[in-house]
Amino acid sequence: MAHPTYTITPFALREASDDALAAVNALRNELRAEREPHDPPTPVATMMHRMRNVPAFVDARAWSVSNGGGLLVAFAVIYIPITDENRHVAEFTIDVQAAHRRRGIGRGLLAHIVDAADSQHRTLLVSATDARIPAGEAVMERLGATRGIVAQTHQLDLAHLDDALVQAWIDDARTLAAGYELHASEGPYGEEELPAISALHGVMNEQPRDDLDIEDERMTPERLREIERYLFGGTTGRWTLTARDGASGDLVGFTELYLDTERPDLARQGDTGVFPDHRGKGIGRWLKASMLRKLRFERPEVRLVRTDNADSNAAMRRINEALGFEPYSANCVWQVRVDQVRAYLHARRPEPLDGSRHQVP
């Protein structure tokens, strides 16, 4: 039986119509169900807001793929940071509907991604795969990509949270971190907080990067505000706890938690960090324990908390395991040189996407 003909079309993320974005959301939700089969779909309003509010410091380019009947069957995006750091890197995603895989669509999209990367003089492509979709790992191996970071998502069932341990960590901090205070906030940061919070985010550069060839990212107040615009126009909200040195008044640590009104039973752990000069006082555990206790009392409908950590991040894994987090899913961030991908494509003589003689790379 003949395969359909496919058409690749540039897709303007920020200017796309509601109908076009709804089609992309439906496709992505179909693939998300493969990765997270027990989770509800992403609301279309949330996806529309984020697509139209990609931070200004990111050059995002996208392509859609339709079959002969005009139905969307694949979608790809490349994210090129327009910053002083990491000017060699671009990140990409390719989503192909299961029924249309192994027909050359991924290879056709990769050709556009490589051209876009070259146009901004990028030499390294980065992409993530999920262990629940083995085809993604197979694609990256065929491209000659190498594993940059191997990570896991862990999940905590709050019904099994050790309340005695949480209280013990809070009590320990009263002695070890005497003179420090915790402060809670919700939603976007106030203008007066932005410089200090941006500096705090810098500690995240100390997380293990394993073999991933990326540089430290410099968070600025302007970038942080752009990220907030991207996050907060839909159904997502954020809680933040900060630790302040009572003597100097300086912010020295923070932890973030994300909640979604469309998924009231789930919270997602964001960044947690403490400045090096203030470590060894139990501040990180104090922040995590206090946030979980706050969540239990103020949002009793939340049953689950998820967090992502590199397998090599032993310190954070110890904290999470002590709290009762268990493995939920595994993923990997891969890296491959742009010239390797171009050579791969050239060796396979790209042809029109009629699907009959191709396999997804």
Image (spheres, rainbow, N blue to C red):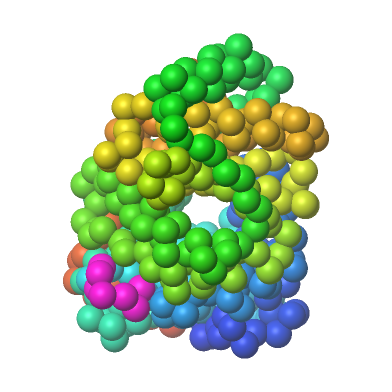
In this rendered view, identify the residue nearer to me: 337 or 317: 317
Q: Residue furthest right?
A: 301
Viewed as shown, does residue 89 lie left or right of 77?
Answer: left
In this rendered view, identify the residue nearer to me: 176 or 154: 176
Decide whether residue 49 is among the magenta residues.
no
Task: Work out which quarter of the rendered image holds the C terminus and state it.
Answer: bottom left
Residue at 28%, 45% in the rendered image? 206
**Prevailing SS of the magenta stretch:** loop
Q: Residue furthest top?
A: 164
Residue at 55%, 27% in the rendered image? 289
Viewed as shown, does residue 27 lie left or right of 278?
Answer: right
Image coords of residue 246 (percent x, y): 45, 40
Q: How many marks?
A: 0
Image coords of residue 207 (percent x, y): 31, 43
Location of residue 296 (image quadrant): top right
Residue at 62%, 50% in the rendered image? 185
Image coords of residue 314 (percent x, y): 32, 28
Decide whether residue 83 is among the magenta residues.
yes
Residue 98's place in the image compared with 300, above or below, is: below
Viewed as shown, does residue 80 lie left or right of 242?
Answer: left
Task: Work out which quarter of the rendered image holds the N terminus and state it.
Answer: bottom right
Location of residue 164 (image quadrant): top right
Q: Is residue 145 visible?
A: no
Viewed as shown, does residue 229 lie left or right of 88?
Answer: right
- Specify start and end residues of the magenta stretch as a single range: 81-87
Residue at 57%, 20% in the rendered image? 166
Residue 82's place in the image compared with 356, above or below, is: below
